[in-house]
Every structure is written in C-alpha cells, then in structure tokens.
Amino acid sequence: VRIKIFSPRHILNACLLFVVLCDRHSTMAEAGKDDSARKTLTWVGLFLGELRDGLTMINMQSAFLIASKHYTEKQAGALFFVFGISQFLFQTPAGYIMDYSDKKVHLLAFAAIATTTLTVITAMTAEENGANLGWMIFIKFLQGAVTALIPCGLNSITQGIVGTVGMTQQVSRNEMMNHLGTAIIVFTGSFIAYNQYPDIGTLFIVSPISCIGVVYFLSRIKPDDIDHDAARGLVIESKPTDVAQSGGVDSQGGLNQPAAVNKTTPSFNFGFSAPTKDDSSATASQEALRADTPLQVMRDPILLTFTLICFLFHAANGCILPLVMQSLALEGGRSGILLSGFCIIVAQTFMVGTAKICGEKSALYGRKILFLIGFFSVPLRCLILTGLLYLRDLNGSSLFLQIVILSTQVLDGIGAGAFGTMYILVTSDISGGTGRFSLTLGITTAAMSIGGTVSGYLGEALAEDLGYREAFIILGILALVPALLYLFCMPETLPTQYTPGANVQKVTTNVEEEKERLLSSKNNSHQV
C-alpha cells in the first residue's frame, strides 16, 4: 500500500507557509526597521538545513547504499569515517579562511554547490556491492572538506550582519530554520524512498532543490550588509548600512552606534606586528583593533575546556540516533526505511522548538543552565532506551513499543537542539574581541566532527559485540562526563551587558569605556 494522502509538494508548501507567517510576525515586531538581511538569513538557514553539516545526507546516503547498492555496514561505515575525518582536518583551516576573506557569501555558496554535486555523483556512480569503493571514499573525503566551510560560513555572515550582541536571537532563528529545513527534506526523502523502495536513488532530488534555494537567497545579501570586523569578532557591534544613524538599542538587543562606512576589503591581521596607520579614515580606536594570533586563541583555557566538552558530547551522543534507527529498522524492508526517516523528523521538529527557547531564554537565564539541560537529557535518553529494549527483549516487539522507542527522539530534539544553538553562542562569547570568531568556531566544530566520527565506530562496535541495550548503558555513562565537566569547569560566558535586564542607558554610555578596556587588555597581551 502506498501512502498518497499528502504529496511532498503539499507538505513543502505548508511548511513554507509556516515560515512566511513566522517571518511576518518578526517583521511586525521590528516595524519601521529595514531587516532585509536578517530575513534573508532566515531563508538561507531553511534551505541550508540539509547541507549545513552534511550528516543528514550522509545518513540518507548510507541507507541508499545499503538498501539499493547492497553495501555492507562496514563499507558504509568506512565512508562515514572518511567523511568525518575529512571534516575534522579541514574545519579549523576553513574557519581561518573565513576570518581572512571578505568573500564569505561566495565561499558559502561554493560549499553548498560542491557538496550537492558530490551527493548527486554518489547516487549516480555508486556500483553494486561497493565495487568502486575507492572512488566513493575519495568522494566522501572531498565532501567532508567542502562541508567544513558551511558552519563557520553561515555563522560568520550572521555575526557580520547582527554583531556579537545580536547573535543570540539570530542564531536561534537560524537554527530553527535549519532544523525545519532538515525535517522537510527528510520527510520528503523518506516518502520518496518508501514509494520507490528498493530503488531509492531518486530521493536525492531534494539535494539540488535545497542548493538552488541557498544560492538564490545568498545572492540577495548585499556586500555592505556585512561588517567583516564584526564577523570576525574583532568589534562588538556590526555597522551595516541599515543601522540607525544615531545611538540607541535596536530590536535585537544590539547597541547601535553612529553609522560607519563598511570596509569591504579583508581586515585580516596576523597579530604579530603593530597595526598599520595608513588608513586616513580610521579613528584612533579602530587603528588599535587587531586580531589575536592563532596561538593566543588556542591558549585560552576556557576555549580548551569547551573544545574537550564538545568532543566528549559528540563521542557519546553521535551514534545514539543511528542505533535507534537500526533498532527500529530490525523489521526490515519498506517500513524500516520509513521508521528510520521518522526518527530524524521527530528529533528535528523538537529541535525547532528547543532552538526558539534557547534564543528567548539564554539572555535571560544565561547560557549555562540551558546548556546543562541539553547535556543531561542524553544520559536520561539512554536510560529510557535501555529500559524499553529490556521490555522488548522480554515481551517481544509490538507496534506500540516501536512508537514509544521512536518517541525518545523528543529528548534528542532537546539535547542536540540545545547544543546546536548554544555552542555557537558560547563560541561567540569566548571569541569576543579576539578577531578570530570563525577560527574559534572551526576549532570547536572540528572537535564535534572527530567526536562524531569516534562515536560512529564506538557505538556500532558496542552494539555488535555487547548488544544494543548494553551499548546504550555505556553511552549513557559516557554522556555524563561532558555534562559534569560543563557543570563544574565552565563559567557562565554570557557578557552581563547583553542581558535584557541591564540598564540600557548605562550600557549605551559605557560602550566606549568597555571597548577601551578590551583594547588596553589586548595591547598589554601583545606587549607581553
């Protein structure tokens, strides 16, 4: 029986209508202000959902290769491993490049086109039983390298448009649209695969459709919309052309200063030499602004601690979703493909709500408490899954029990949803004033990539050698480590001047004093 009550076209139209309504609500809240760049970012985030870290397409590619091309689990796992290692190797250099370049929009568009092309090549050139496995490994290595540009690209553009102070709400909005886009893509792809099973290669038509949307909306971002010093975290506020001419507080909680002419040439400075003074239009404070060296960034103990936490979180959490998908797909065939798709859909749907809550509440309650809720949801999820699998082993499988197992993906939506939003905000907090936001984000994202790669092998090995129930017990214990590290070793990173309860007049009048303090601190560190 084939489900044809709702077509993917109807579902996509309904989801886009939802986004339009949300966007209209945002416009009403920001009446009288030109917010075109922020609106465009929202649409970029929606279509970038399937492409942003490559993992959604990698999971769908694995299902395709195993179901349609008869790859073994080890062959598919080898491709996943190569993809993860490639991301790890190129993530930090990608952030370094984004800090240097004023062509961030072009680089992000290139990454979207390249990873889409490689996904289509995978579907078109894969041979039965992994006959051309070497070629496929090469394709996955290239795909991991180009997707490394996407996280730092999107977030550096975002920070260049809204500034550090405006990141909380805009990152939340970006993440909401990322997750919604992923849910739409997976939902559409799952139904295509369900109807075309076992020849499910046509599901990858969703990838070029997403890419077209990304490139179109990126082309609508004007060069003057991005302040490249703000994008790097060198200055606190962005000064795009739509910022008000007089001081005040904007609708995103940012502190508006008198408008300045954007510098559209690379503002990169290695930090080893004194700042140049040949720019006659620069003020004395602007001349003093310079980026920290990469070595200075990597010596920050808070960044090192947070990087370790990112690695440990993904080492424990990265393989839980594939294991849940596999445990639901044990029935095999068409229903297994559909249930596996719904695992992602349920999680991504709740990630939308989680990202919204993080954006609204992190400035009010701080980053730490919301991050901890996400961290501790993972061991709770593993505990529940262990109990459910025990009941299934004891009483046999049933549709009700399968649905209950599927419902644990709600906790994945809470944990991964909180992490996806908060790690960007915490990284932005840590890198504020360094001029190395993209480099810092590349470091933390690289830790996530290698953690997810280790997790993929670790989870599958535990499930094969010990069983799924024992694997969830061990992974739950491992997930407690980053949660406890964050609880006891990480400080609250939210700057006090960003909280909505702060005295606006006091913050506005003390902005220059805060800048001078930061500049003085940076100059002292360079002298040392």
Image (spheres, helix red, strand yellow):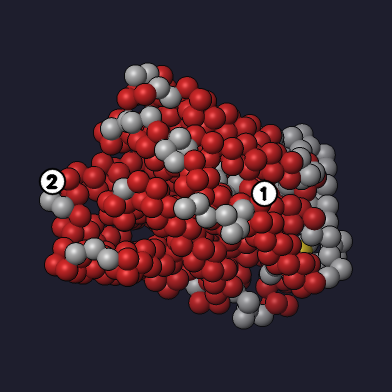
Q: Report the front residue among 9 and 196.
A: 196
- Residue that label 1 marks: 44
Question: Amino acid under label 2?
Answer: Asp
Q: Where is residue 178 in the image (x, y as percent from the top left)?
A: 57, 54
Tell me if mark 1 has few (under 14), some (14-19) or many (20+) residues whose alpha carbon lies within 10 angstroms of its own.
many
Whether residue 61 is situated above or below residue 124 in the rendered picture: below
Q: Is mark 1 on a helix, strand or loop?
A: helix
Q: What element carries label 2?
A: helix
- Residue that label 2 marks: 465
Question: Amino acid under label 1?
Answer: Val
* Residue at 41% from the left image edge and 43% from the top image edge: 59
Image-based side of 526 in relation to 157, left or right: left
* Residue at 70% from the left image edge and 77% from the top image edge: 504
Disc nearer the start of the sequence (2/1): 1
* Residue at 75% from the left image edge and 71% from the top image edge: 25
* Residue at 43% from the left image edge and 24% from the top image edge: 126
Q: Report the front residue among 92 and 2.
A: 2
**CA distance separating discs 2 and 1:** 43 Å
Instruction: Tell how many labels.
Output: 2
User: Which callout, 2 or 1, points to the residue nearer the camera?
Assistant: 2
Q: Where is residue 112 in the image (x, y as percent from the top left)?
A: 60, 36
Can you see residue 45? no
